[in-house]
């Protein structure tokens, strides 16, 4: 059953938020924070906020070319964070990283659904095995650390009903979803059994400055924006599917709230965004915000159709009620900020 | 909520079965069958049946001392099966094993819940990563093979209600459950996306000849029987918990039906047994069947309590309705046959 409540909602509709920034900021000032995947899209935006807030930030990133890490994401932060280039699969270094940290944002991951189907064992090594190694390191060397794990809406598979809340059955439709599910379970288990304080956030489509635009491995919005800025038409596959989008600053709010809130220990929360739109509506909005551009609609490719989840949007009421999180950025504003960033920075992301 | 429907049922109650043996036998006569974990408890009982039915059987087993493999389990079959001692983690040998097989019974696994908590990465390597390698080998080298994966009731975690059917939420309570869940998902995904014909059977407590009795890594019933035959009192932890038991011959029926039935492709089925009993009742019955013996009841140890699932018994109506499977062995008969085996064979299993 599909319930479509929001498909025609105005993307300009305001979503006033109430993130308790001053007290949240105090939770991080002067504290030691480790971010795996720290050169990636979300990790680097999180690092920038934390540096502004006076945290001592260590980034671990492998810079695997197909993943999200990009040195440009650190522009302006040089000398203000500690950067360690390494792979979270290197288990022997993990105890050194987690020791003495107050917070761990566990964002390193393989994100491409297609890559996970073509090379399932690599996806497993990064999204499951390395997560277990990280948690073992925490358990043995720093059981008081506060951990947030970036999970994904992909775990839900094709929704039974919309919007999807955290109690929806978990039916991953690809290897990536299966391994992320294992990673999520490990985090909750290590909280329950070993007392390692973990929170899981299930992210939906996150967009904003510093996302990968070279290809669609992180989000299809990336390749749309790249094409638009290069003056080429972009491709919309299908077009009818509903999706929700979180602006990266709102995602960072959620990560920071989850790690700092006692009420978040051992919990799973969806993040979400302003009311969902169809891909067609998103494409039109993007062209409008850009002040021009072209796109073509084509049928969904067969190999992707096998692992497609259909319509999806998140119910984020649980994190709103428990932690006070809300998306604060409209979809139009999110697209405008993202386009503005890549207009200046395009050359660094190709 | 707990629903206790059967706790006082007479364990002698008859459970007449109707396994279509003649036609099932024909499905295997002269066919090539691979069994991973083939020297183990269930694998070796399956191999014995298949040899009797005229199949060409290859066994792969690592003989890791803490697991279920035991060369004695092959007594009398020497020269009638092909035995390859190796580990399913050795991915390069897998294509050779799966090529040209008609059936694969994928039974190799780490089964100890406590071991999975103490050495989670080994559990992951065997129960998740190696499963992915096996399925990749099937996909690339023998996509027409029929696969049955031995999964576990442990995936359900603490039941919301009893008996537990296949639609019950999956909430594994230990690392073993998380990794078996991933293994199960891979099998279903490879069916759905790549057309590798897989069936998942979720086993409950399986007992019978050739089970591990050296310690409780496979089942607590093993150490009970060992103590009883050695004239020592055995320990019952708690005692009130309800459990169901499948006799190994009935489990073998289920495996053979699942691999041979077209209706089983891409499906998940619980196996189960005669009406459940409390552990205390099981202990009393075991002593009665043995004609004597002693046991002591003690409180559940704290480290096990953290990952205990409370009462559990399976609803096996789905496999009954779809494939005609039924447990044919009463609990009393199962215990009697098992005791009779170990009275003769004890020395080979210590």
Image (cartoon, coloured by chain):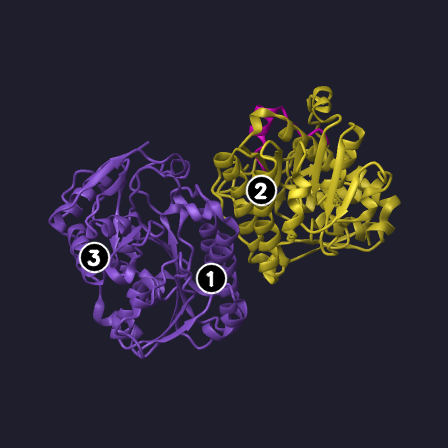
Chain colours: A purple, B yellow
Which label belongs to residue B258?
Answer: none
Chain to which the residue tagged by mark 3 belongs? A
The reply, left or right, for residue A213 in relation to residue B181 is left
State how far apart marks 2 and 1 are (Cα): 32 Å
Residue B247 place in picture, x, y as percent: 72, 36
Magenta highlight range = B311-329
SS for tag 1? helix
Question: Label 1: how many residues lie within 10 Å, few (<14), some (14-19) or many (20+)?
Answer: many
Q: Is residue A10 visible?
A: yes
Residue, disc 1: A191
Which chain does the residue under circle 1 lie in? A
Tell me the CA gap for discs 3 and 1. Answer: 36 Å
Q: Is A303 one of the magenta-colored residues? A: no
Determine if marks 2 and 3 fall on one subunit: no
Query: Where's residue B124, x and y in %?
Result: 58, 54
Q: Which residue is mark 3?
A: A338
Q: Is residue B326 magenta?
A: yes
What secondary structure prevails in the magenta region?
Answer: loop
Q: Which residue is mark 2?
A: B135
Rendered view: B160 above or below A15: above
């Amino acid at each position: 059953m599909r319930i479509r409540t929001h498909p025609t909602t105005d993307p300009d509709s305001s979503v006033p938020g109430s993130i308790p920034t001053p007290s949240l900021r105090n939770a991080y000032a002067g504290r030691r924070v480790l971010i795996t995947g720290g050169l990636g899209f979300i990790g680097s935006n999180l690092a920038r906020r934390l540096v502004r807030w006076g945290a001592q930030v260590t980034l671990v990133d492998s810079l695997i070319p197909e993943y999200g890490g990009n040195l440009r994401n650190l522009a302006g932060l040089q000398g203000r964070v500690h950067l360690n280039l390494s792979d979270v699969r290197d288990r022997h270094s993990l105890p050194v990283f987690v020791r003495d940290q107050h917070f761990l944002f566990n964002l390193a991951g393989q994100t491409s659904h297609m890559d996970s189907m073509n090379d399932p064992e690599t996806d497993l090594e990064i999204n499951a095995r390395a997560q277990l190694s990280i948690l073992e390191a925490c358990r043995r060397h720093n059981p008081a650390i506060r951990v947030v794990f970036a999970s994904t809406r992909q775990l839900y598979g094709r929704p039974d009903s919309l919007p999807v809340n955290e109690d929806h059955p978990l039916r991953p439709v690809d290897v990536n979803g299966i391994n992320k599910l294992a990673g999520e379970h490990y985090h909750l288990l290590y909280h329950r059994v070993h007392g390692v304080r973990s929170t899981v956030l299930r992210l939906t489509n996150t967009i904003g400055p510093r996302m990968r635009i070279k290809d669609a491995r992180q989000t299809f919005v990336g390749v749309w924006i790249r094409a638009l800025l290069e003056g080429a038409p972009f491709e919309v596959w299908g077009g009818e599917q509903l999706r929700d989008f979180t602006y990266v600053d709102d995602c960072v709010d959620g990560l920071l709230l989850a790690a700092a809130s006692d009420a978040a220990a051992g919990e799973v929360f969806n993040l979400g965004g302003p009311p969902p739109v169809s891909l067609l509506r998103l494409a039109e909005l993007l062209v409008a915000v850009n002040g021009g551009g072209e796109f073509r609609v084509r049928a969904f490719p067969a190999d992707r159709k096998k692992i497609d989840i259909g319509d999806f949007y998140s119910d984020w009421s649980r994190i709103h009620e428990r932690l006070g999180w809300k998306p604060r950025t409209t979809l139009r504003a999110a697209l405008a900020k993202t386009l503005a960033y890549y207009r200046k920075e395009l050359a660094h992301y190709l």
